[in-house]
Image (cartoon, rainbow, N blue to C red):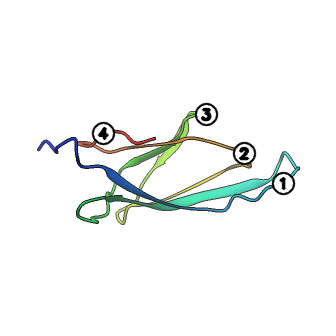
Amino acid sequence: MKFQIGFMLLILIVASNFLTFAQDKKCTVSGYVRDQSSGENLPSAHVGIMELKRGVNTNNYGFYSISVQSGKYSLKISYLGFEPQI
């Protein structure tokens, strides 16, 4: 089933990212991946951190959680039938 390019993923990111001078500060980036037009959760979407070349898949509810060192990163969200979002 093909989706129109006009459909985009709505990415809700709840991030714990505190400014700190310590290099070993861990943070958790978590949230839900949903279809922007329908609001439907997207299970098994891939959420990756481009700079670290690692990622996770969302659970059955579209939820993901990734723990990383404090810093500035780009997330890439991919889901079959949708254009990837950065």
Q: Kindly state the secondary structure of the residue where label 2 is placed.
A: loop
Which of discs 3 and 1 lies nearer the camera? The answer is 1
Q: Which percent across, then down, holds residue 57?
A: 43, 50
Q: Kindly state the secondary structure of the residue where label 1 is placed.
A: loop
Q: Which percent across, then down, holds residue 16?
A: 66, 62
Which residue is at a point 62% across and 35% down the rendered structure image?
A: 52
- Say left or right for 38 vs 45: left
- The amino acid pointed to by label 2 is Gly
Instruction: Give whichever of discs 2 and 1 has the lower sequence position.
Output: 1
The residue at which mark 2 appears reads as: 71
Q: Which percent across, then down, holds residue 66?
A: 58, 53
The residue at which mark 3 appears reads as: 51
- The amino acid pointed to by label 4 is Glu
Q: Residues within 10 Å of mark 2 (few under 14, many from 20)?
A: some
Residue 41 in which image quadrant: bottom left
Which residue is at a point 27% across and 43% down the rendered structure image?
A: 82
- Farthest residue to the left: give it: 1
Dot label at residue 83? 4
Q: Kindly state the secondary structure of the residue where label 4 is placed.
A: loop
Residue 27 in which image quadrant: bottom right
Q: Residues within 10 Å of mark 1 (few under 14, many from 20)?
A: few
Which residue is at a point 33% across and 57% down the rendered structure image?
A: 43
Q: CA distance from mark 2 to mark 1?
A: 9 Å
Q: Residues within 10 Å of mark 4 (few under 14, many from 20)?
A: some
Mark 2–mark 3 contact, CB under 8 Å? yes
Q: CA distance from mark 2 to mark 3?
A: 10 Å
Dot label at residue 20? 1
Q: Is residue 29 above or below residue 84?
A: below
- The amino acid pointed to by label 3 is Glu
Instruction: Give whichever of discs 1 and 4 has the lower sequence position.
Output: 1
- Say left or right for 26 vs 84: right
